Amino acid sequence: MSRDRTLPGLAVATLVLLGVAAAAPGWMVFTLVVSLAQGLVVLGLMVLWRAGLMSFGQSLYYAVGGYTVGLINIQFGLSNALLLVLAAPAVAGLLAFLLGFLLARYRDIFFSMLTLAFAMILYGVLVKSSTLGSTDGFSILTPSFLGPHPGPDATQRLLTGLAALIALLAAALVHRYLKSTAGHLATAIRDNEIRVEYLGYSVHRAIHVKYVLAGILAGAGGAIVAMAIGHIDPEMAYWTTAGEFVFVAILAGAGSVAAPFLGAILFVVLRTYAAQYTPHLWHMVLGGTLLLFIVFLPDGVWSLFERACRPLKRRAPS
Amino acid sequence: MTALLDVRDLHKHFGALAAVAGVSVAVAEREVVGVIGSNGAGKTTFVNMVTGYLPPSRGTITFRGRDITGRPPRQVTGLGIARSFQVPQVFASASVLDNLLVAIGIAEEGRLPIWTPLRRRQRVARALATLESYGIAGYASQPASLLPQGVRKLLDIAMATVRGPELLLLDEPTSGISVGEKFAIMDTIMAALRAQRTTVLFIEHDMEIVDRYAERVIAFADGVIIADGPPQAVIDDPEVRRLVVGERVKVAE
């Protein structure tokens, strides 16, 4: 069995990200924090995807995460970033736990469309809620950290550093989960649900846990992006937002817990440059990229990484 | 002798068809029971009801004095009844070792097995020992989808037995296996099960297998039991000869 280098790899990557958060230009820091938020959502999608399930409605929990931050701002006047980034996934996870009782009974396209339906219901509610700013949404308080406000630039850098640490924690925990019996049940469920039940485990429960995990991660992503942008609106729940997450999941591949973050960074960079250099054609550039990935790199950008590492392993003495 | 499994007046109707029409049978601890019957006689439906895959239309199933009628497979499994399948049910894209590790992981851990790594050293050792006892340790790293039929059958049975079930129901353990291999494979299965002191009920069409391994034989026809007793007596029963085994079958001594 080859040695697992995921955790040391994640630790090194986090150090690099912390360096970027501290020293890189402002636009790059902003790109990074948005990518990390998106990567968290896609990490959750990956957990579901491994069991053969794809959520077209992860924007539901992304929006719940963002609006939880906004509502705590309004109701309690609290803006502590650490508190908000813990509260949002808790609320999102609770909602996922409740909806999971229904969703765990569905598979394939029915699962996907039901997740989409729930996201669109939330979108509808948000658009109609004038107290929540309707289609315009509302502004988020500048996040605070322990101590006095450090100013806008330092706030963004601190938030990005926090996002990097949360991404590390999430990736490490999900990695541990994927190596556990429940993690391996993903393949088992995709292959043969009857056998899982006859081994004495509830397939519903296994899927329910995965769904809650994905909801928690999407809630954390929504909270981070809300604080980074300083504004939330119903677009967060819209199906195009959910579509982006699926896009990134395909771009990234499901090979490693690091893949979603790599995919998200690639996506945000691609979209930024496509919009800058081809302002009228950027949708086409994104669509074309997705097409190329599906045809030539069906296991995502992570498979390139794996391919690059393989010769090293082969050369190593056994 | 107290009955381990006690089935009373079991019925299963699919629309107008009565697949099982009033079966009552008791199985004692450590018995090895062969179940015979032509296709459509109700054997697999009976096993499906005992293991919770199908709810009975009528009747009761008691296991160790406890009513388990209509409980789902995972609860029935938890109570100590396991089964194998006529078409082996394995995780095709996982390796043989991982198939068994998942089975052991579920058996060893509780409701939320989300923390302990699946491939713990002592668990891998246990899985390899189990594969060894079924004579298929050499296939450990192969994906289950590439296995020969006989090996896949053995893996299916090995997975069913990791909880140390008290009662194991085998659905046609030698179907799809070549004539040359069938005794060797049954010897392997029965030796492993004897070591675990498991009560066994196996469905089988091959009368040589039934005669060689069963202590008691139950013959099904049209959803009812038409004979129940020692193998030779049941196989020689005129009704069983007419409906199940055929007139000219002579089991080699």
Image (cartoon, grey):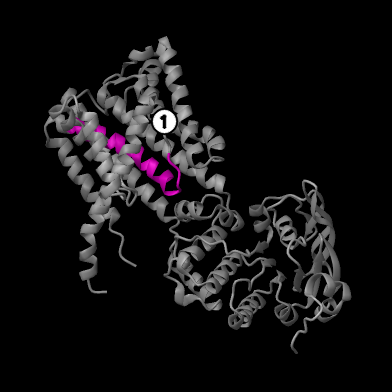
Q: Residue furthest right?
A: B238
Q: Residue furthest bottom?
A: B253
Left or right of B79 on screen, residue A227: left
Q: Quadrant of residue A84?
A: top left
Asked whether residue A95 appears in the rendered view, the answer is yes
Which stretch did the figure color magenta? A29-54
Q: Nearer the viewer, residue A182 or A245?
A: A245
Pointer 1 residue = A61
| Picture residue at 80% right of the left edge, 79% below the top | B231
Q: Is residue B9 above or below residue B189?
A: above
| Picture residue at 72% right of the left edge, 79% below the top | B213
| Picture residue at 80% right of the left edge, 66% below the top | B220
Instruction: Classify the position of the N terminus of chain A by image quarter.
Output: bottom left
Q: Is residue B153 magenta?
A: no
**Residue A89, horizontal then vertical, whole percent:** 40, 33
Instruction: Classify the position of the C terminus of chain A by image quarter.
Output: bottom left
| Picture residue at 22% right of the left edge, 70% below the top | A316
Q: How many discs mark residues in the rendered view?
A: 1
Q: Nearer the viewer, residue B41 or A11?
A: B41
Q: Is residue A314 above or below residue B62?
A: below
Amino acid carrying mark 1 in the image: Tyr
